[in-house]
Structures are given as C-alpha cells and as structure tokens.
Amino acid sequence: MNTIMRKSVLSVAGLAFAGGVFAGPIAAHANPVDAKPVAAAVQTAAPKPQGEQSHIDLTGEKTANVKAIIAATKKAGLPERAAVISIATSLQESKLDNLGHLGDANDHDSLGLFQQRPSSGWGTPEQITDPAYSTTAFLKGLKQVDGWQDMPLTEAAQTVQVSAYPDAYAQWEQQATDLVGQYWNS
C-alpha cells in the first residue's frame, strides 16, 4: 500500500474513532423519553421497483388470495421478499383471481393465481386452483433460483414462470410491496 493511500485510510479510521469517542458520551446522557424509534425498512436489500407501476383495486376475494399467498410464504419459512415476488407474479398472471378453465380464452391449460399448467407438471387442476398449493409450488420454483433474494423481481419471477412477457412482472412490484407491508403481520 503506498504512503498516500495508507495516510488516507488512517485518517478515515481516525475520524471514525474520534466521532465515536465524542458521540458515545453524548448518547449516554440522552434522555430515553425523547428517543424516537427508528423505522426499519421492510425490504432492506431488495431492489427498487423498475419502470412504470400498475395498480388494481382489490375485491374481498383478491384480498383473501393475497393473505393466502402470505400465509403460504410464512409456512415455507421464506422472507417477505418471497411474498412480494409471489404477489407481483400473481398480479401479472391473474390479477389475483383464482382462474379456472377459461376455454378458448385460456393460455393453453393455465389455471389458478399463477396460471400454472397441469401439462407442465405444476399439479392437478384441483391442486393448482388451491391458492396455498399453487403458492407453495411457485415458491418451490423460486427457491431453486440462485440469488433470487437480490435480483430484480421481474428476473426472479420470469425464471420461475418462463413467460412470453418477461418484463411484465416489474409493473406490480410497488403494489405487491404495499400489500405485504399491510398484511404480513396481520
């Protein structure tokens, strides 16, 4: 390490130490009654939403599906970020409606909250239209994606879903984040 670099590093370290020495006694005498709690970020490591954001109004059934996704995520022992990715995926795939067979309007044999296909091995039609089952199946796929916790939501969702519209998931990230924030602890 050259001399200039070493002096710079030592200067920064000295300032940090001095700041701690002076701030320590001040903080020790602070009035705890005046202390204000610091808000913790729900998604500290999560990337910010990408691009234009979309939003839909939720009916009672859609809200129940959000709660089912969150419950399945908790049961799987996964963090809030997994619920955000799951809800955003469901918002894109079905607008949080538990889709049954839609005839010619259906994308192949896609069903449920995530438009999972029995013919692709996601489960039986009965299983796929069970919100807890379909969420657990989606989360199982998500857990197999290396680094899903730190990648953009749309990339994580696309890796699991293999959609013809890979960037479409991003538009739902803010609403999904808000819904997880609202219902995670309820």
Image (spheres, helix red, strand yellow):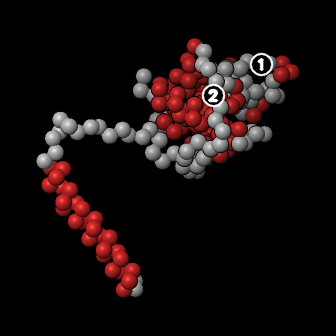
Residue 43 left/right relative to 105: left
Position in image of residue 152 (x %, y %)? 60, 47
- Evaluate whether residue 124 shows in this view: no
| Residue 101 circle label | 1
Position in image of residue 172 (x %, y %)? 63, 34
Q: Earlier in the sequence, mark 1 or mark 2?
A: 2
Disc 2 residue type?
Answer: His
Q: Nearer the viewer, residue 162 or 48?
A: 48
Disc 1 residue type?
Answer: His
Q: Nearer the viewer, residue 163 or 109?
A: 163
Q: At 55% across and 27% down in the image, what residue appears?
A: 69
Number of other residues with Cα within 10 Å of mark 2, as a class: few under 14, some 14 to 19, many 20 or more: few
Position in image of residue 129 (x %, y %)? 67, 20
| Residue 157 circle label | none
Q: Nearer the viewer, residue 130 or 86?
A: 86
Position in image of residue 140 (x %, y %)? 59, 37
Q: Quadrant of residue 40?
A: top left
| Residue 55 circle label | 2
Q: Secondary structure at mark 1?
A: loop
Q: At 65% across and 42% down in the image, what residue appears?
A: 51
- Evaluate whether residue 64 shows in this view: yes
Residue that sits furthest to the bottom in the current view: 3
Number of other residues with Cα within 10 Å of mark 1, as a class: few under 14, some 14 to 19, many 20 or more: some
| Above/below status of 64 relative to 41 | above
Q: Quadrant of residue 137?
A: top right
Q: At 35% across and 75% down in the image, what residue appears?
A: 9
From mark 1 to mark 2, how far is it between C-alphas? Answer: 25 Å
Q: Secondary structure at mark 2?
A: loop
Q: At 52% across and 30% down in the image, what residue appears?
A: 178
Residue that sits furthest to the right in the current view: 104
Q: How many marks?
A: 2
